[in-house]
Image: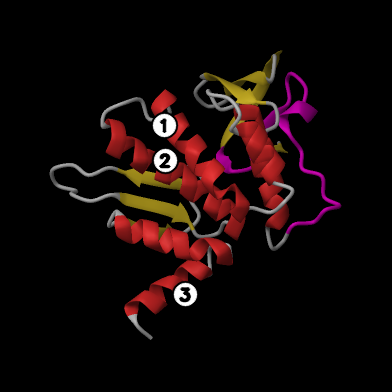
Amino acid sequence: MTPEERYRKILSNHLPAAAVGWVYDYLNLHKVHFHITLERRSKLGDYRRPYSDHNFHEISINGDLNPYFFLWVFLHEAAHLETHLHYRNVQPHGHEWQEEYRQLLIAHAILFPTDIQPLLKKYTRHIPLSHPIAKEIESTLHHYDANYDPDEVPLTLNDLHPGDRFSLKQNRDLLFEVLEKRRTRWLCKEVTTGRQYLVNGSSEVIKC
């Protein structure tokens, strides 16, 4: 097996089959150091731009994601790379990044299942990108997890009440207390430090 065949095989274990060729070509075009990591509760992916002692693009993505979720995260990180190439020093998720991300999602929406595509169309219609729709997309992407149970309805922050305590499903290290509703978000207090955060109501949680 050649190095290219081995690389494509690794990618095929984590991406939809139709996306493998494009991602392989993209990584080679930009000479990206690409890492598939163990589960990280703090983040799903990461992009590091070149600098004096790190003279290359670097992308890492959690290897426990289903193929469509893996692609979703890859496009997010690729948008950071594109933003660096076109604008250099701008806000990480500012207008420039949102436009690059929007263009990548539009160009590659066909690689996602048919139930995701209408959500992507809605999501990319306007800048700034709507955070609540992103949460809806991610919730739908979880339907493609190997252990997904359609009869198991996930608990979201919107199901809780002031005074309830919870941890985020994707980060169980922190304990929060619900304070009050703020439109689509909830004001919550991190119990250990007392710091307050606005958390999207559609976030999946574990009640404590």
Looking at the picture, which amino acid does disc 3 mark?
Answer: Lys
Q: Is residue 197 above or below residue 175?
A: above
Check contact, mark 2 vs mark 1: CB within 8 A. Answer: yes
The residue singled out by tag 1 in the image is 97
State the quadrant of the C terminus: top right
Neighbourhood count class around disc 1 (C-alpha, 10 Å): few under 14, some 14–19, many 20 upward: many
Residue in the foreground of this view, choosing between 163 and 144: 144
Splitting the image into 4 quarters, where does residue 173 fall?
top right
Magenta portion: prevailing SS class: loop
Where in the figure is residue 122, as x and y percent of width and height?
A: 66, 32
Instruction: Compare marks 2 and 1 and give the one earlier in the sequence.
Output: 2
* Relative height, residue 22 to residue 10 (above, below): above
Magenta stretch holds residue 171:
yes
Q: CA distance from mark 3 to mark 2?
A: 24 Å
The kind of secondary structure element at disc 1 is helix
The amino acid on which the numbered mark 1 sits, given as a three-letter code, is: Trp
